[in-house]
Every structure is written in structure tokens, then in C-alpha cells.
Amino acid sequence: QVLGLATSSLALHAPSQIAAAIEQRAGEAGYSLVMAMVRGSGPDACRQALQELRAQRVDGVLINAPLGSRDATALADAAGAWPLLFLDTDPAGTVPSVLFDPAEGARCGVSHLLQHGHRQIALLAGEAHSISAQLRLRGWRETLAAAGLEPVAVAHGDWSAAEGYRQTQRLLTAGTPFTAMLVANDQMALGVLRALHEAGRQIPQQVSVVGYDDTADSAFFYPPLTTVRQDFRLLGTQAVETLLAGMEGGMRSQVLPVTLVTRGTTG
Ligand code: IPT
């Protein structure tokens, strides 16, 4: 039997590590995996990928591409009895999903910085259209607001290191004082670190940086990155098992925990 994965660009570290984990768990369960790339964003791009998987007669599909609740529901309705499991949507929605808790992830990054006494915090969010980027940003803002704070700056990037670098240069050029940055993923944080180094800002003595993902390389950044860990192995396992159970009837949504990994970029 065959499972399908419709995925965001595998040029990004998180989706490629998620795909590897899914492929491994599917293999252990005796299934092969067929992948279709979601090119661009939004429900139409996803629909196209689903059509490609349909043509290959996959028995069930995992969708790791950002979809808001309404778009996810429309896709699930159109799929009928074909089992779909969503990996990048709003946990408050009604479609079957396996997701890391975005509110919890945002909260633990902010709390860590507050514990170290930071008050001037800049935010670098992910792609504006991404539901996960929106939910992380909302979680940051809410946790800051609960402490009586507002971010000193808010920018969006496309999840890439290049964009983390550029957005940090803009922030530095603007002259806004900040002592810490919350970054929506580790790839952008890599570019952030370089821009700060080049500007002569010491990390973490002058600026602390918290990433998000804990991809395989993040412990090897300089300094090693403090980040919110999403256990992609766990996601792969839970996603495949949930989908297989759903193919027998009855899919149970799950919210997976995240943890803060403290390394050298915060203090
Ligand atoms: C999410 C990653 O955290 C982020 O780094 C980026 O790669 C994004 O995916 C791409 O869509 S993880 C996803 C399961 C919410």
C-alpha cells in the first residue's frame, strides 16, 4: 500500500526533516511514500498536489503545507472518504491534524527571555500567509502583552537564512534599540546571527536570539542556538500512525508538545 505526502518546499530544513521522518515510519509500517510538492501557497496549490497524489492512487494523504481552518475544511470536504491528515493548520480547526502547539512554543521562547530580564524584544515572524507563522506571532504578542510589553519591532521573513540576514540588517539600520530577538525558525536565525556578528553585536552579551524548530544543524551554529524544539521524529511517527488508524476509520487529532533547548545564544 502507498501513502501520499503533499509538502511545502523541501529546500526548507523543517519540511525535509519531517518528510524523512514520515518516510521512515511509513517504511517500518510496510508502506511506501509518494511525494508531491505544493508549489506556491494557498488551497489551489494544495489541490494541485492532491490531484497528483490521487492519480497515483495513494490510500491516504499527509498534508504539510500551511492552510487556514477554512481552506483545510474545504479540502477535507472535497476529499470525501479519501483520508487526509493536516500537519500545518490551526489546532482550533475541525479537520484531523497532528500539530506542535504553536501557542506553547511562542510562550516558552518569550518566558525564557523575560526570565533573563529582557524588555526590548524584536520579533522576526515567518511568511505572512503561513498559519503557523501567524500563530507563533500571535503567541509571542500575547505573552509579551501579559507581561505589559510590546515588541520594539516586528518583521516577516520567508523562512530562509538570507531573509533573516536582510531583515536583521534593516532592523540595525533603523536604529531601534533591542536586546533580544525571537525568530520564527532556525534557518532565519542563522542569517540573524551572521548579521549581528557583522555589526559587531556580541551574542548573547549584547543581543540574545531564540530560534524555533531545532533542526539538525542548529546546535552547530555559532554560538549554538537556543531554540524551541519541535521533535520531527515524533511528528513523523504520530502522523503516520494517526493516518493509518484513520484509514481503518476514525482519525484522532493530536497536539504535540514543544520544549525549549537552551544553548549559547541567550543570556
Ligand atoms: C514549519 C517550520 O517551523 C518552519 O521553519 C518552516 O520550515 C515552515 O514549516 C515551512 O512551512 S514546521 C510546520 C509543520 C508548521
Image (cartoon, grey):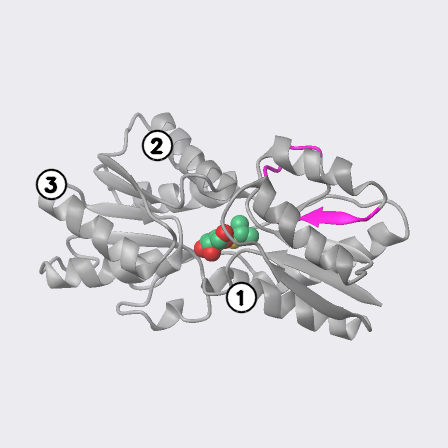
The region drawn magenta spans 82-94
Element at badge 3?
A: helix
Total numbered labels placed on residues in the image? 3
How far apart are labels 3 and 2 at the CA level? 22 Å
Whether pointer 1 and pointer 2 mark residues with C-beta atoms closer than 8 Å, the reply is no
Q: What label does residue 49 carry, if any?
A: none
* Residue with the mark numbered 2: 144
* Residue with the mark numbered 3: 174
Image quadrant where residue 52 sits: bottom right
Query: Is 225 rendered above or below residue 157?
Result: below
Tag 1: residue type? Ser
Observer-nearest of 214 and 37 = 37
Tag 2: residue type? Leu
Q: Can you say which quadrant of the picture contains the C terminus?
A: bottom left
* Residue 35 visible, this angle: yes
Q: Which class describes the residues within 10 Å of circle 1: few (<14), some (14-19), or many (20+)? A: some
Q: Position of residue 190 (x, y in %)?
A: 30, 62
* Residue with the mark numbered 1: 16
Q: Residue furthest right?
A: 248
Q: Is residue 59 left or right of residue 240?
A: right
- The mark that comes first in sequence, 3 or 1, is 1
Q: Can you say which quadrant of the picture contains the N terminus?
A: bottom right
